[in-house]
Amino acid sequence: MYLAIKEMKHAKLRYSLIMFMIVLISYLIFVLTGLAYGLSESNRQAIDSWQADAIVLNSDADSHLSQSVITKNQLAKLKSDDRLAQLGELGVTARDPKGHKKVSSELLGISKNQFIYQQLTTISGRKFNSQHEAVVDKSMYDSGYRLGDEIYLSSDSPAYKIVGFTKDAKLSVAPVIYTSLSDWRDIKFGATSDGQVSAVLLKKNQLNQKADDLDQLTTEEFINKLPGYRAQNLTFGFMIAFLMLITLIIIAIFLYILTMQKLPYFAVLKAQGISTKYLVKNTVGQSILVTVSGVLVGGGITVLTAIGLPPAVPITFNYPLLAGAACLLVVMSVIGALIPARTIVKVDPVSMIGGN
Amino acid sequence: MHAIEMKHIIKSFGKGIGKVSALNDINFHADYGQLIAIVGPSGSGKSTFLAIAGGLLTPSSGEMMIENQTYHNSSAKDREQVRLNKIGFILQSYNLIPYLTVEEQFRLVDKVKRTPNLNPEHVQQIEKQLGIDDLRKKYPDELSGGQRQRVAVARALYADPKVILADEPTASLDSDRAFEVMRLFKELAHTTNKAIIVVTHDRRLAQFTDQIYEITDGRIQQLESA
Ligand SMILES: Nc1ncnc2c1ncn2[C@@H]1O[C@H](COP(=O)(O)OP(=O)(O)OP(=O)(O)O)[C@@H](O)[C@H]1O
Ligand SMILES: [Mg+2]
């Protein structure tokens, strides 16, 4: 590494520039990874928190929760079991009595005797236990709601009272408001309310009674069919993959140009008995040094960003995930360095004899 | 024991109708304390000779020995070791790494070579002899052409090789400088007891050498000593 380090010290500007590029790219990759992870989380968090293995929806709903209605009759066909939880869903705009603080939310009705309610934990306040009470996601706190506040969930429904906050309760990027199933039915169906639910969640694949008019999906299948979820993940995946590829190409081009300039010197060094391995190691070493220092600075800026970011931005920095992205970047830099390394292997010291 | 010895070396390039015979039955040896010049017209085989002597090319047939150790048929890795430890190469240009100072050029040799190099006193003595003792902290682009070649000589000597092979080492120098370098080679061959072989097409340099060989059409022949 002697040659590598001496050269980098001598040509500081060149190597700082390429390092600066890596800083920018790695920062972009980290932010995109955080955004991808954050958005993915706020799509599925609530579902993950239920720890269900499968979900039953009406076949006509085409796997979409918001379009699914399971009637009392259909429900009657399902075994009643403690590993089964009914769920009612409705997209609502929550508002305070003055009509400020409007928040698009997911109203979810759950039954007190079933596992979603039983697993529900509050970070402040308590779970709901009587009519017109609600437990809401903690992001509602950031929107200005407090324990005991009144909240309206539709234009003609009575005021609900916030009795507790829970965490990790986001569904399709909206905060979740949990109420009882009967409250949910009142809001969604009003007078036509008749024991319907939107879906039934199952633990350990309880349902295998294949009703014609009901579909059963695994939780993962269901999440993948959340509106926009897959498209979003693919888009981010592509962007990150392209940035990785760009890193590889930048490193390869940069080192290739520098290597071409140094090639006659390398040929003479080879004539003098210095091994090709030593020269290749130095080039790969430079690539790793530049990338690791660039990624570290990029990571530092990412941490600062994470600290300074307002909570409303759906970025979640999952550090193991970012470390994975950083490692992948270093792998890219090694592959990038192997391209110029080929020219080092190929250059023939004999070509330097005779001077032409 | 000869420092370097070639027996019946033949080297040809290509096959069939395109076959070029570059060296034809070369018998040659160099001894310690000798400065030898190899001259010859263009295309006669001088560079091929030097490449084989330095283990950069393998002969088509014949034997090549350095300190009685045959190495024409050893692996590329072993030949690399021979070059590192026993041969100092001085080429026409690109001998010095542009981003290393003079003293760092020597440090690089320390980094890659396991066997010991010259001790500091010895280095100082050679630097004085070569007139480069106040250039240690300079980069190659801060040196004149002559200074650069003298540093290249010092670098080749630093690894303390038995044999020094120089390919047109004076080509980029004016005659005064060229003569100066040749005088140095002669002095070094004698004082440090090395075999120094210089390939050149400049016959005026012959006056400084102990022996002159001429290669013509791949055959070698000793000329009258100067
Ligand atoms: N790699 C090669 N492939 C084919 N022919 C070669 C190769 N290297 C050298 N030759 C041929 O071998 C002969 C000797 O070449 P060499 O380079 O040794 O000459 P030279 O004496 O060094 O000439 P110059 O003074 O011009 O440098 C020439 O005819 C040359 O064309
Ligand atoms: Mg030649």
Image (cartoon, rainbow, N blue to C red):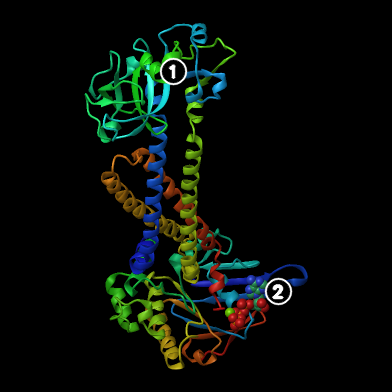
- Which quadrant of the frame does ligand 1 lie within? bottom right
| Residue displayed at 34% across by 52% down | A298
Q: Nearer the viewer, residue A321 or B139?
A: A321
| Helix, strand or loop for disc 2 | strand
- The vertical placement of A212 against A171, above or below, is above
Can you tell which of label 1 and label 2 is closer to the viewer? 1
User: Ligand 1 near label 2 (Cβ, under 8 Å)?
Assistant: yes
Residue A133 horizontal side relative to residue A72, left or right: left
Residue B166 horizontal side relative to residue B215, left or right: left
Q: Nearer the viewer, residue B12 or A37?
A: A37
Q: How many marks?
A: 2
Pointer 1 residue? A189
Question: Where residue B142 appears, x then y in whole percent?
Answer: 35, 81
Question: Where residue A7 appears, x then y in whole percent?
Answer: 37, 66
Within 10 angstroms of label 1, few (less than 14), some, or many (20 or more) residues? few
Within 10 angstroms of label 2, few (less than 14), some, or many (20 or more) residues? few
Question: Where residue B184 appears, x then y in whole percent?
Answer: 40, 85
| Residue displayed at 48% across by 70% down | A261
**Subunit of label 2:** B
Q: Quadrant of residue A281?
A: bottom left
Q: Quadrant of residue A110?
A: top left
Q: Nearer the viewer, residue A249 or A51?
A: A51
Q: Outermost residue, right direction?
A: B17
Pointers 1 and 2 within a single chain: no
**Amino acid type assigned to the residue bearing label 1 in the image:** Phe
**Amino acid type assigned to the residue bearing label 2 in the image:** Val
- The vertical placement of A34 against B161, above or below, is above
User: Ligand 1 near label 1 (Cβ, under 8 Å)?
Assistant: no
Q: Is residue A271 visible?
A: no
**Subunit of label 1:** A
Pointer 2 residue? B20
